[in-house]
Image: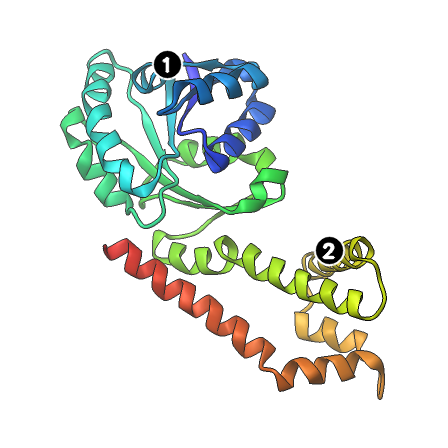
Amino acid sequence: MKKVAFIGTGNMGGALATAAVAAIGPEEVVLSNRTREKAAQLAAKLGCLAGSNEDAVRSAEYIFLGVKPNMLMGLLDSLAPVLAECHAKGEDKVLVSMAAGVHIADIAARVQSAGYAVPVLRIMPNLCVLVDAGVTALCAPEGTPEEYLQTVETVLGSSGKVVRIPEAKIDAFSAVAGCGPAYMYMCLEAMADGGVAAGLTRAEAQQFAALTMMGSAAMVLGTGMHPGALKDNVCSPGGSTIAGVAALERHGFRAALIDAVLAAWEKGKALGKA
């Protein structure tokens, strides 16, 4: 039996499938997609198998659901009979959803006709999994066997860091980690624009800004220091850095980022209720 299946091989599903192949080997992964040729092309590249949604469920123990949120319930309706068929043969499955705004309880209720309480976990990866530098939230109901959580962590281990959080915090996680790359790209682009204005080439400015952002994040993670303290370490009395920090404060830089996170959080909660 194949260990994991990915139904939906778009950017995110395809990136996680690629990470899974790196982590557990191509022989343990099977792919499926609404456009079968897309799954077949990725499978050929990764050296794993591709098939229909039903084939994927039958051949795997863990089923990663990478379809768009508005398509998830229809997919679950089509998979419920297959889950029941497998259950009758003693081959129970675990579902792992990556659909934003769709709660674990709603997914479990949709497949209750399978004849058993289908275990459901939920993940929320961010865009950086595409370069194996992502952070993925992992949620599961209380009482979920540790084996299920550890398996998902192993499967996704090559995509970056996997963090366990309660489902109640997933909207806040998404507002920071899911939406955050967009904020970082805007900051990076603006820094590069400033560098160009100061006389750097576009390529130089973009590279310097990106390396600086990457190194600054590494400092926070590596030292455990508060970012405010690290900022203070860069600011010499009467120097150029504190002049730049003062300019950011005049323009409400920190307040704008806080507002962005809160706006994304509110929107995420609203989507979950839609």
Instruction: Estimate the x, y position of residue 176 in percent, counting from the top left.
Output: 50, 60
Q: Is residue 53 left or right of residue 201?
A: left
Q: Residues within 10 Å of mark 1 (few under 14, many from 20)?
A: many
Where does the N terminus fall, quadrant-wise? top left
Task: Please name the residue that numbered disc 1 is placed on.
Answer: 59
| Circle 2: residue type | Ala
Instruction: Estimate the x, y position of residue 2 in percent, counting from the top left.
Output: 43, 15
Q: Residues within 10 Å of mark 2 (few under 14, many from 20)?
A: some
Q: In percent of the image, x 72 and y 65: which residue is there?
A: 193
Determine the CA span between mark 2 and mark 1: 42 Å
Instruction: Estimate the x, y position of residue 99 in percent, counting from the top left.
Output: 35, 42
Q: Quadrant of residue 75?
A: top left
Q: Quadrant of residue 143?
A: top left
Please say if 221 is above or below 121: below
- Which color mode does the image show? rainbow
Task: Please name the residue that numbered disc 2 is placed on.
Answer: 210
Question: Can residue 30 be seen?
Answer: no
Please say if 63 is above or below 227: above
Instruction: Estimate the x, y position of residue 254 in percent, counting from the top left.
Output: 58, 76
> Which is nearer the eye, 31 or 156?
31
